[in-house]
Image (cartoon, helix red, strand yellow):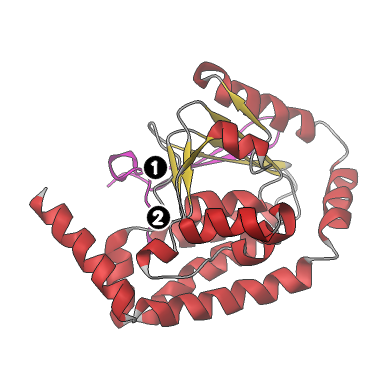
Amino acid sequence: MSEVILKSLSDQGVLTLTLNRPEKKNALTGAMYQTLTDSLKEAEKDDTVRVVVLSGAGSDFSAGNDIHDFVSAISDPQKIRIPLGFLQAISSFPKPILAAVSGVAIGIGTSLLLHCDLVYADETARFQLPFTRMGLVPEGGTSLMLPSALGHRKAFELLVLGDAFDAKTAAEVGLINAQLASADLIETVIEKANQLAQMGPEAVRQSKAMMKQYDENTLQSVLISEVEAFAARLGSAEARATFMAFMQKGAKG
């Protein structure tokens, strides 16, 4: 079995974490979450790591949570707390995090981007936060961060209506820094990462900390309350019906 998270550290101190499940559009499993969490915690303590880059293998960034993990979480809601460890790790990570997005970025595949410092996407990128469509509620800090950044009405549109949107729209609302050509995506992200890696690490860390300090305690509290609400919703009739319909559709092929 191949590694579900590929790790590569450059001579410049850029750690690239690649979601490596392209046959499933890099849908995240519990094992992937745990590896990401462990990798971020290790990178935080490792002085040779200056910057982290997140990307997806193949043509997609991430289709969100693996549906089979979701179904198993219905009978064991504690499993839904595994992603909480990752969200706590990425949201409090003190060093710069960049993301390169192509293809689908659904659910957590979009919400995790809110915790990155620079995000670039190509013209194939499609973002979506379909939580309520699945009988669930927002997660990943989205219920706090999106209304704060976009206002209630635009956040409601993205989080409750849950329609997919392209990279142009993502750039317009500030979810990403810019839309790039596919051929330029990784090169540009690595270029930005190297630029940050060459700066004074303490100045970079302190600057990031200063920009986040006022919301940090509130965000951590919201992450926990969202997961609790999310776990409760997993057992609802609405969510069960959505998951079962999805599984039946998949079985028919």
For marks 2 and 1, give the one nearer the viewer.
2
Return the residue nearer the eye: 224 or 207. Answer: 224
- Labels 2 and 1: the sequence-earlier one: 1
Residue 27 covered by magenta stretch: yes
Return the residue nearer the eye: 236 or 226. Answer: 236
Compared across the picture, whether 87 is left or right of 200 comes to left
Compared across the picture, whether 45 is left or right of 37 comes to right
Task: Name the residue rendered at 67%, 30% in the picture.
Answer: 11
Are circles 2 and 1 on residues that touch, CB within 8 Å? no
User: Residue 59: image x %, image y %?
Assistant: 39, 31
For the question of whether residue 119 can be seen, the reply is no
Q: What residue does disc 2 label?
A: 28
Task: Name the residue rendered at 56%, 24% in the picture.
Answer: 185
Q: Describe the element under mark 2 as helix, strand or loop.
A: loop
Q: Could you tell me how many numbered marks the image carries?
A: 2
User: Residue 236: image x %, image y %?
Assistant: 34, 81
Compared across the picture, whether 29 is left or right of 88 comes to left
Placement of 70 over or under 110, stated as above or below: below
Residue 65 covered by magenta stretch: no
Amino acid type assigned to the residue bearing label 2 in the image = Leu
Task: Name the residue rendered at 85%, 65% in the picture.
Answer: 214
Amino acid type assigned to the residue bearing label 1 in the image = Asn
Q: Describe the element under mark 1 as helix, strand or loop.
A: loop
The single residue placed furthest to the front in the displayed view is: 153
User: Residue 158: image x %, image y %?
Assistant: 54, 53
* Crowd class of label 1 (few under 14; some 14 to 19; many from 20; radius 10 Å): many
Placement of 226 over or under 138, stated as above or below: below
User: Residue 97: image x %, image y %?
Assistant: 67, 45
Residue 20's disc is: 1
Residue segment shown in magenta: 1-30
For the question of whether residue 43 can be seen, the reply is yes
Placement of 177 over or under 92, stated as above or below: above
